[in-house]
Amino acid sequence: MNFADLGLSEELLQAVSAAGYDSPTPIQAQAIPSVLMMRDLIGIAQTGTGKTASFVLPMIDIMAHGRRRALMPRSMILEPTRELAAQVAENFEKYGKNHDLKMALLIGGVQMGDQIKALNEGVDVLIATPGRLMDLFERGKILLTGCELLVIDEADRMLDMGFIPDIEFICSKLPATRQTLLFSATMPAPIKKLADKFLSNPKQIEVARPASANENIVQHKVPVAARRKREVLRHLLRTDNVSTAIVFCNRKTTVRELAKSLKGHGFAVGEIHGDMDQSSRIAELDLFKSGDINILVASDVAARGLDIKGVSHVFNFDTPWHPDDYVHRIGRTGRAGAKGRAFTFVADEDAEAIANVEKLTKFKIPVFEVTDAEAGTPQPSRREQPREEKPAPRTGKKPGDARPEKRAPKSERSAAPKKQPRRAAAPESANDRADEGWNGPIPSFLTLSSD
């Protein structure tokens, strides 16, 4: 099957061909004809399956017929994050280049002025995050009564981020006679309830999870103590033929600290997390896409939907708390038929989290061992080496006959000097000077890290 079999216009087929695609993915082949027939649709699919094009392509042809009106977008796509919204906008620009369509991007972190101006001129396609859309609606800068087609993308992520009440409010302000498309990686009860309420006799499509079906991703779990994660990561970045990599962390603070550490060790690193403003995040992504940096340290804000070509490796510096996030993270590599590798660092406290991942994906992730010597962990110093027991001198006595030496009387012991002076003939070494004042092994909690 090719795209010409799906009922798309000739202008759209030319744009798809120019982008380098000739055959639809399974979700595209199932969804596009139904969307063109104006049916409501539920698509259960992970990112990396071609989900975005399954609604962008038919929307372009549908919106090609009609007239724009000020403040009243003709169609709307809701995305949970700015990055996903920006990426969908890129798809519209790429595939809609042969159509006279106006698009507006409504996201937080940027000035409202240009967005309000675009709405005043009229738009065919509005791509928005719920927060900014609600803000402009409450200000009276946008009317929803002219929307003919609504797409709710990444619905389960919307649920995680607390956007479902906003989605319900937005849907209640839209015309009752409209087409609604809902896409979600999973179908928990609140999403099912949302679909039942706002979709009319939808067609349901489900495609396989990339984590279980994508054979192009080689997965590993790396048992590692939390304090050794950075050195193990540096070892793998240097030795595993990494061309470009995304390193995922669970916390924004970890993203910042790890990026700073990697830069200090000479790596070309960028970072992206929720505390950055939109322009800074876009700038970092552009540097990564252009190859000016080849390692991107990210929080889960970047895990979903980012379509960056040629990512050779994904590193889960932290085992994700939610198993669905694992699927989305590793889906950044092994795309479009390319090979990829995914490493997940598993500390002792991650046992339950990695077990949940393996339960979800129905795949026992192979263990990848990295020894201390391979990772460059300093070996024990001379003082830390266990002492060899010297054989006792022969005394002619049988084992068990040895008796403790008689100690000097207490009065004599107290009169003895506490410390004998060094002999002049015994040269002092650097190690001797460094260890002076401590006679035992160095406790592990006093070991210092260069990070």
Image (cartoon, rainbow, N blue to C red):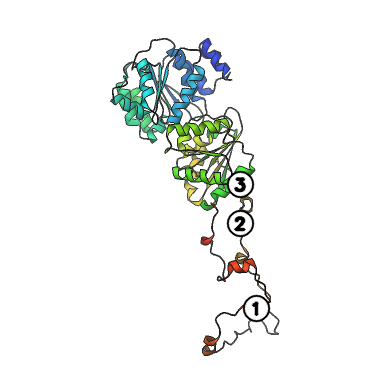
Q: Position of residue 360 (x, y in %)?
A: 49, 38
Asked where in the image residue 148 lies, by quadrant, the reply is top left
Please report the residue visible at 45 percent of the width from the left and 31 percent of the height from the top: 279
Asked where in the image residue 84 lies, by quadrant, the reply is top left
Question: Is the residue under label 1 in contact with that under label 2 (CB below 8 Å)?
Answer: no
Amino acid type shown at disc 1: Arg
* Measured Cα–Cα span from mark 3 to mark 2: 13 Å
Asked where in the image residue 112 lies, by quadrant, the reply is top left
Please report the residue visible at 50 percent of the width from the left and 15 percent of the height from the top: 97
Residue at mark 1: 423
* Measured Cα–Cα span from mark 1 to mark 3: 46 Å
Q: Is residue 151 above or below residue 270?
A: above
Q: Is residue 105 visible?
A: yes
Q: Say few, some or many: other residues with alpha carbon within 10 Å of mark 3 (under 14 / 14 to 19 / 20 or more).
A: some
Q: Is residue 204 left or right of residue 287?
A: left
Amino acid type shown at disc 3: His
Callout in the foreground (2, 1): 1
Q: Earlier in the sequence, mark 2 or mark 1?
A: 2
Residue at mark 3: 235
Q: Position of residue 225 (x, y in %)?
A: 53, 52
Residue at mark 2: 378
For the N terminus, the quadrant is: top right
Q: Position of residue 174 (x, y in %)?
A: 32, 20
Q: Position of residue 185 (x, y in %)?
A: 45, 31
Q: Which mark is residue 122?
A: none
Q: Is residue 147 visible?
A: no
